[in-house]
Amino acid sequence: MARRILPILASQLLVFFISSFSATPVTGEDEGFARSLDRKLLGLKKEKLSHFRFYWHDIVSGRNPFAVQVVPPASNASSGFGKAQGLYASASQKEPGLLMVMNFAFIEGKYNGSTITILGRNSLFSAVREMPVIGGSGLFRFARGYVQARTHTFDVKTGDATVEYNAYVLHY
Ligand SMILES: *[C@@H]1O[C@H](CO)[C@@H](O)[C@H](O)[C@H]1NC(C)=O
Ligand SMILES: *[C@@H]1O[C@H](CO)[C@@H](O)[C@H](O)[C@H]1NC(C)=O
C-alpha cells in the first residue's frame, strides 16, 4: 500500500489496574438480557482481508524518545523491562522475549480514528516475529488477524530501532 500510515507511538504513563468484579452467572436468551442480532443492523456486510505495512519507530535516545523505561529490570535479570506506545515488557528470563500490547492508531485517510490492537510475544532475535491482531475499533470492529514484524534497522549504540510490521487483518 502506497499511502503512508503512521502508527502513533507516543510515550504514555503506565497504569496498572487490578480489579475484581463478580457477575451473576445467567445464561440463555430467554432471560431477557441477550438477543441475536442480524449483523446488517451494525452495518456489517462482507468480511474482507486487508494488508497494511507500518514502520514502527522505537526511538529511545535523544531529547524526544518514543519509548521510556518505566520499570527498571530486576538486578539479575538478563534482559530489561520497558514499554513503548501501548507497552512492551520483558517476559522471558533467558532471551529477549517481549510481551507486546499495543494499538496501531490511524491518523489519516480512510481509516483515520480507527485502531488495530495487537497482543503477543515478540522474540527479538527471530527474523520474523508473529503476533496476533486481537481486535480493533472503528472500521476494525471485530477485527482479527496477525502481524509479522521484521527488524529494519537497529542502532546498537543508541538502541534505536525501526521495525517493519506487515499486518493481515480480517475486518468488515
Ligand atoms: C535472581 O535469580 C535467582 C534465580 O536465578 C533468584 O532466586 C533470585 O530471587 C533473583 N534475584 C532477584 C533480585 O531477582
Ligand atoms: C483525523 O481525524 C481527526 C479527528 O477527527 C482530525 O482532527 C484530523 O484532521 C484527521 N486527520 C486527517 C489527516 O484527516
Image (cartoon, grey):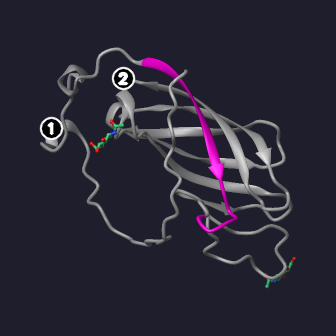
Secondary structure at badge 2 equals loop
Location of residue 94 with respect to 31 vertically, above or below: below
Which portion, as a residue range, is magenta? 48-64
Which amino acid type corresponds to the residue marked 1 in the rendered image? Asp
Do the residues under discs 2 and 1 have CB atoms within 8 angstroms? no
Is 5 placed left or right of 46 in the picture? right
* Residue drawn at x 54%, y 57% as measured from the top left: 85
* Residue 54 disc label: none
Is 142 placed left or right of 82 in the picture? left
* Residue drawn at x 26%, y 59% as measured from the top left: 24
Residue 128: x %, y % from top left? 77, 36
Q: Which residue is mark 1?
A: 30
Dominant secondary structure of the residues highlighted in magenta in the image: strand
Q: Which residue is mark 2?
A: 172
N-terminal of the two: label 2 or label 1? 1
Residue 113: x %, y % from top left? 34, 40
